[in-house]
């Protein structure tokens, strides 16, 4: 039997430089093509799919640098959480005033596919109407600081440690660095759990727990987050699920519950019926809101019982764009919560559903006076708009 020998073909290389990649940031803070200034980044420019992937990864390197540079300009600092008794570490970001601002803290938690400091690369690279600032976390961070929050950015998306770079990468970035097609020599480096997995940040939920435990114990951010600090949360997708499931884990609510003042989620992936702690369920009902994938007008109330809190349309069918497109509404909601924590989420009645289907009683939910989405009492059931439910409990366009 004859086996064709693989040739030592050199991998195609692309520079991590926007100009050399034919792109630039225009006056409206959008990524556009130099040769076609009105057109956004185009993924498929080669017939070779591997080249397209490598070129996109080079663009994403530029976007990561843009995001970190803008956060650095706002005074953000990188802190490496070192794993105990292990060579791995994972970076997080915090605003420079974290040491001095004792009143309120905003946690920003990205999805499981997002880089540190980024909500959505898709928003950053040209998906209208988002921009570089809104697709990154620089936009919401700058507004939050102006409103008086200190900011802590978690890293629930880049959890794979690269020993050569000495930092963590997303799943996609790790594969692009460490794997090749068979024709180019095959895998360079396989995944070694004992070596490449970050201890204490094995998954998004573990990462949230590690950051919060080490903040609470003051092992890392010594005295930066005192006990009297009110904590608010903005989380996207899997990051939202990780936060809620951590909060629902044994003993956490009793220790932390009183410190969390409110939350806004973008297309979260948890189920209210999967939660065990009544305190967490009540907190979600009284202090949380979800913005979800839907075709309804932006800010319209969505009839969706999955999350145990009020749900509102982001007017997009792309899950990763929810937070970038709803930043203004999210901050307005958190500020309303701060001013009137007991009244903002009062007044709406929705039908509570269990996972197997069927109604299981009525619950009060959110929708106080002055909040977008309507005031007064509204009876909400599954079956319309972005909250349409299939037999298995999933919803149209939810991105699961």
Image (cartoon, grey):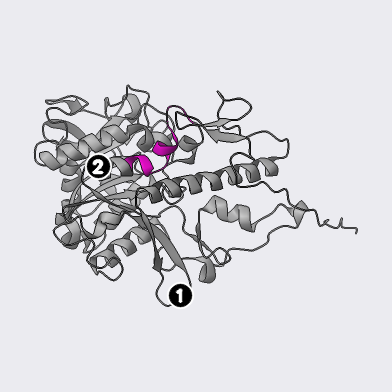
Within the magenta stretch, is there residue 377? no
- Mark nearest the camera among 2 and 1 is 2
Q: Which mark is residue 40?
A: none
- Please identify the quadrant where the N terminus is shown: bottom right
Residue in front for this viewpoint, 94 or 347: 94
In the image: residue 214, left or right of residue 293: left
Residue at mark 2 to residue at mark 1: CA–CA distance: 38 Å
Residue 62 x %, y %: 54, 45
Residue 181 x %, y %: 71, 52
Residue, x 27% and y 25% (percent of image)?
300
Residue 87 x %, y %: 48, 73
Q: Which mark is residue 146?
A: 2
Residue in front for this viewpoint, 224 or 34: 34
Q: What residue range appears in magenta?
A: 127-140
Give the labeled residue for mark 1: 86
Instruction: Mark yes or no: residue 304 visible.
Output: no
Nearest to N terminus: mark 2 or mark 1 = 1
Q: Are marks 2 and 1 in contact (CB under 8 Å)?
A: no
Q: Quick one: which residue is furthest to the right in this view?
A: 2
Label 2 environment density (alpha carbons within 10 Å; few <14, some 14–19, many ≥20):
few
Label 1 environment density (alpha carbons within 10 Å; few <14, some 14–19, many ≥20):
few
Residue in front for this viewpoint, 27 or 30: 27
Q: Is residue 210 above or below residue 175?
A: below
Residue 385 x %, y %: 33, 24
Residue, x 32% and y 33% (percent of image)?
326
Query: Judging from the image, what secondary structure is the residue with disc 1 in?
Result: loop
Residue in front for this viewpoint, 155 or 266: 155
In the image: residue 255, left or right of residue 10: left
């Amino acid at each position: 039997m004859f086996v064709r020998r693989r040739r030592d073909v050199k991998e195609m290389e692309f520079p991590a430089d926007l100009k050399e990649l034919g792109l630039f940031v225009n006056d409206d803070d959008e990524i556009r093509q130099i040769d076609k200034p009105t057109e956004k980044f185009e993924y498929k420019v080669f017939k070779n799919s591997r080249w397209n992937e490598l070129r996109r990864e080079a663009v994403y390197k530029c976007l990561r640098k843009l995001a970190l540079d803008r956060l650095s300009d706002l005074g953000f600092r990188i802190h490496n959480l070192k794993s105990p008794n292990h060579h791995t570490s994972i970076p997080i970001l915090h605003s420079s005033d974290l040491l001095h601002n004792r009143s309120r803290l905003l946690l920003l938690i990205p999805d499981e596919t997002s880089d540190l400091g980024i909500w959505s690369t898709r928003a950053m690279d040209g998906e209208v109407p988002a921009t570089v600032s809104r697709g990154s976390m620089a936009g919401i961070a700058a507004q939050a600081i102006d409103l008086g929050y200190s900011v802590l950015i978690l890293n629930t998306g880049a959890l794979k440690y690269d020993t050569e770079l000495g930092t963590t990468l997303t799943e996609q970035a790790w594969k692009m660095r460490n794997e090749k097609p068979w024709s180019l020599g095959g895998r360079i480096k396989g995944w070694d759990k004992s070596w490449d997995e970050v201890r204490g940040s094995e998954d998004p939920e573990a990462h949230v727990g590690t950051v919060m435990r080490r903040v609470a114990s003051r092992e890392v951010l010594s005295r930066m987050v005192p006990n009297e600090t009110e904590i608010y949360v903005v989380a996207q997708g899997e990051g939202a699920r990780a936060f809620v499931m951590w909060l629902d884990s044994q003993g956490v609510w009793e220790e932390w519950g009183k410190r969390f003042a409110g939350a806004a989620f973008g297309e979260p992936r948890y189920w209210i019926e999967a939660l065990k702690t009544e305190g967490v369920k009540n907190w979600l009902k009284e202090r949380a809101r979800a913005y979800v994938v839907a075709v309804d007008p932006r800010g319209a109330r969505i009839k969706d019982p999955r999350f145990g809190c009020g749900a509102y349309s982001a007017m997009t069918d792309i899950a990763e764009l929810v937070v970038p497109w709803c930043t203004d509404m999210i901050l307005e909601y958190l500020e309303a919560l701060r001013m009137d924590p007991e009244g903002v989420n009062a007044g709406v009645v929705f039908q509570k559903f269990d996972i197997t289907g069927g109604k299981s009683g009525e619950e009060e939910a959110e929708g106080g006076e002055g909040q977008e989405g309507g005031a007064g009492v509204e009876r909400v059931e599954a079956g319309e708009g972005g909250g349409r439910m299939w037999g298995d409990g999933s919803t149209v366009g939810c991105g699961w």
